[in-house]
Image (spheres, rainbow, N blue to C red):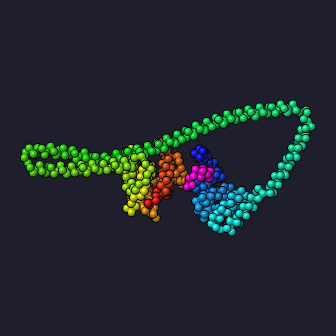
Amino acid sequence: MPDSALHYLRLAATQNIEVRHPQLNSLIPRSVGNVYMHKGNIDSALQFYFAALQNSRSTHESINLGANQQKIAEVYEKLNLYDSSLYYSLNAFNEAQRTSQKSRLLESSNLLVKLYRSMHKYDSAFYYEDLATSIKDSLYGIPKFKQLQLLMLSEQEHQQEIEQEQERYKNKTRMIALWSAVGVFLIIAFILLRTNRQKQKTNKVLENTLSNLRSTQAQLIQSEKMASLGELTAGIAHEIQNPLNFVNNFSEVNDELLKELNIEADKGNLNEVKALAKDITFNSEKINHHGKRADAIVKGMLQHSRSSSGVKEPTDINDLADEYLRLSYHGLRAKDKSFNAITKTDFDNSVGKINIVPQEIGRVILNLINNAFYTVDEKKKQTGEGYEPIVSVSTKKNNGKVEIKVSDNGNGIPQKVLDKIFQPFFTTKPTGQGTGLGLSLSYDIVKAHGGELKVETKDGEGSEFIIQLPGN
């Protein structure tokens, strides 16, 4: 039950913030990494293994240091990155040797044998295979087996002495032993019955807890999607309102001109009629132009806001980013008239179209822009006059990849929570203002597209989120 495991590991991590136990600082993220490995999410597993390694190094905690490096080495070996795996496996071996952890030495030696064989370095493979055999013998070899035999022989002799002693007093104690056996049997039967009932109750509680957790998670994800839909709707309404205002204004003007034309026609003023007809024709062209503009906005917005089909299609990433920047800004303005910020764009025309699911990547861009507007607005409320909130969106083609950057000059992200921002349900917003799922869902969407989502930040100066996607 990996989801339940992650839930309780998060609780353990939260409680350990106060305790700050150095071994738990390493053990908890490594356990999270093990769960992600079980789920087949190698990238997330590697991220948590590195977090565990960093915690071990920062607190000079040596108990788990070698184990963390061993886990990283195993991941790299699965990915066929033998050089990286070899580096961390040798570190794990040396650390286990330094701390005299024989079981760790055996694990590292076996992995080194496998790596050197894959790399066709058979001398090194034979060396570590001999070493692994030696360690295995010291743990489970003949001397240990002999010690076990001696212990068993001693126990057997002791049992024989007890049996002989019992035989001497058998006649006197037969009835007592019989009733004692009956009593013990009844006690065991009672304990087993009570334990079975407790297990049934516990299983029911766990099933209900898991059901509630899944229901809550589904509700939170739906809440996040509905919040995005609301912001999109507000932005679309504002975008359409502008051309509709032109249509309404020119229609009203044409009504007045038609009345004047009729009057002038009755008077027989041909020149005035021609002038008025020319003005009416000009206004009609404007009405047609802005009507088509509203139609294009509606079609474009519906294309990017409809339910995702999950099918990738060639998409102009510059147009997509520009549209969602305007939608986010106008959506926030619709909710809060006092909100204001400077928006800047820097789009690389060489990016062109790339194959993505536009609705999903659009949701990622919208979420990052909304977060940027939120943080600059919070800083504006804190600092007051003299601060100018700025949110920038840019695109660039870099080494065959397309980068979409969303940056702000807000308060930045504190280093102590930087490693947690992509975790599900983690949020720095006040209660009721965020589900903690936006960045987690964004991270998963970008990963599903074969890309990466990274962040660069300076405390007090601002943050920059970088979406890297394949260029074709």
Q: Residue furthest left?
A: 268
Position of residue 207 measured from the top left corner of the image (x, y, whole percent): 59, 38
Q: Residue at x 27, y 46 (%)?
A: 245
Q: Residue at x 68, y 35 (%)?
A: 196
406 vs 146, left or right, is: left
Residue 36 is one of the magenta-drawn residues: yes
Could you tell me what secondary structure mostly forms the magenta stretch?
Answer: helix
The quarter of the displayed image where residue 406 is located = bottom left
Question: Nearest the camera: 350 or 326?
Answer: 350
Question: Nearest the camera: 414 or 227?
Answer: 227
Question: Nearest the camera: 453 or 429?
Answer: 453
420 vs 259, left or right, is: right
Can residue 193 be seen here? The reply is yes
Position of residue 342 measured from the top left corner of the image (x, y, whole percent): 38, 54
Position of residue 278 measured from the top left corner of the image (x, y, whole percent): 16, 51
Q: Quadrant of the N terminus?
A: top right
**Magenta residues?**
28-44
The quarter of the displayed image where residue 82 is located = bottom right
